[in-house]
Image (cartoon, rainbow, N blue to C red):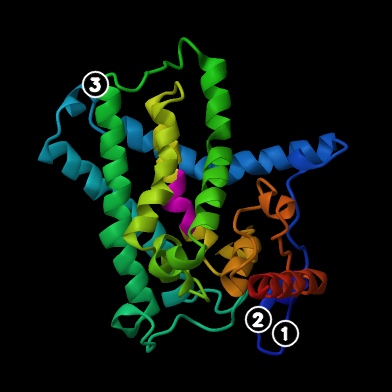
Amino acid sequence: MDDTLYGTRDKRGNWKPNKLPKRAPVFVWPVQPRAFLLWLLGYLKYHSLSAAVALVAWVYLTPPLETMREFSVGWVSLILVRNAALALLVYGGLHTVLYIQRRQQTEFKYNAKWPDTDNPTFLFGSQTAENVFWTMCSGVPVWTAYEVLTWWMFANGYIRYTDFRTQPSYLIMLMLLVPMWYVLHFYVIHRLIHVGPLYHIIHKVHHNNVNPGPWSGLSMHTFEHIVYFSSVLIYFVVPSNPLHAMFALMEAALSPARGHAGFDRIAIDDGKYINNCTYFHYLHHKYFEVNYGTQLIPLDEWFGTAHDGSPEADEAMYSRLKAKKYARRA
């Protein structure tokens, strides 16, 4: 497929989609019923994989709650191995297809360059090697620690267990809101770690990936992993079912692979592609001080930090940064 049918390439070979990011219809007024329904179907489809993985993991790959009333090497190790395997499958799978086999070469790739292999900015000089290190040696253990604590809390009655059989409507609605909470929490902690010292000490590890790939998604400083996965703590106080916490953890742990893939569309067959819709976050890696959240909740629009890739957005960004610079000098 000719990717220029869906976007344009600049003289450096970098690709930009013709369809620029825009806010979700749920936050558009007046209400657009048809657009909202189409968006809702897309919302359910986009998050269905994380939900399905969470369900399978909870039913088949997690010990019974009564087993987890006491910490033990056995069940904790089982969860750690399961999470490591999922990370290797999702992050490693996308990386293999897109960056090792290069099945679609640079078709629909935002940045025409491939990951750095001889750059002293990265551990071992390799962008991918550093990304794998932070993901597997920090991200997976922190993710697992939150999960282990969550199951121990549920097993001992420290978190109120709510059954789908007794409150199905409430729990289904809460399940639909899991991604919304994830996005809100992500925006808040993301803005926080972009502040001065916190950025240089913590978040810079992630932002070394100006040209991100799948493994970049969870490549973060350990402290950032701790605050990032803390989104699950809301289910310690909101009446919920363990499946909500599992869905929240899977969403946080696995969705960054797709969000940092570096491709707007991913080939699944000859002439067939999945629309990845990650240009909004790619622009954050490219420009640094825009698009701290996602399109799901238009927080960046409300706080004046949105960038949709257009020349007008470029002008607005440079004007804002210039004003900010003068304000600091005053």
Q: Which residue is mark 3?
A: 156
Give the residue type at disc 1: Asp
Q: Residue at x 72, y 42 (%)?
A: 39
Badge 1, how many Cα within 10 Å: few under 14, some, many 20+? few
Residue 270 showing in the rendered view: no
Q: Which residue has dot 1 on it?
A: 10
The kind of residue on which mark 2 rests is Asn
Q: What residue did someone put label 2 on?
A: 14
SS type, badge 3: loop
Q: Is residue 270 left or right of residue 5?
A: left
Mark sitting on residue 229: none
Magenta segment range? 251-256
* Drawn side of residue 201 relative to residue 82, left or right: right
Considering every residue shown, the one lying at the far left of the view is: 73
Q: Residue at x 34, y 22 (%)?
A: 159
* Residue 112 image position (x, y, % from top left): 59, 82
**Contact check, label 2 and label 3, Cβ < 8 Å:** no
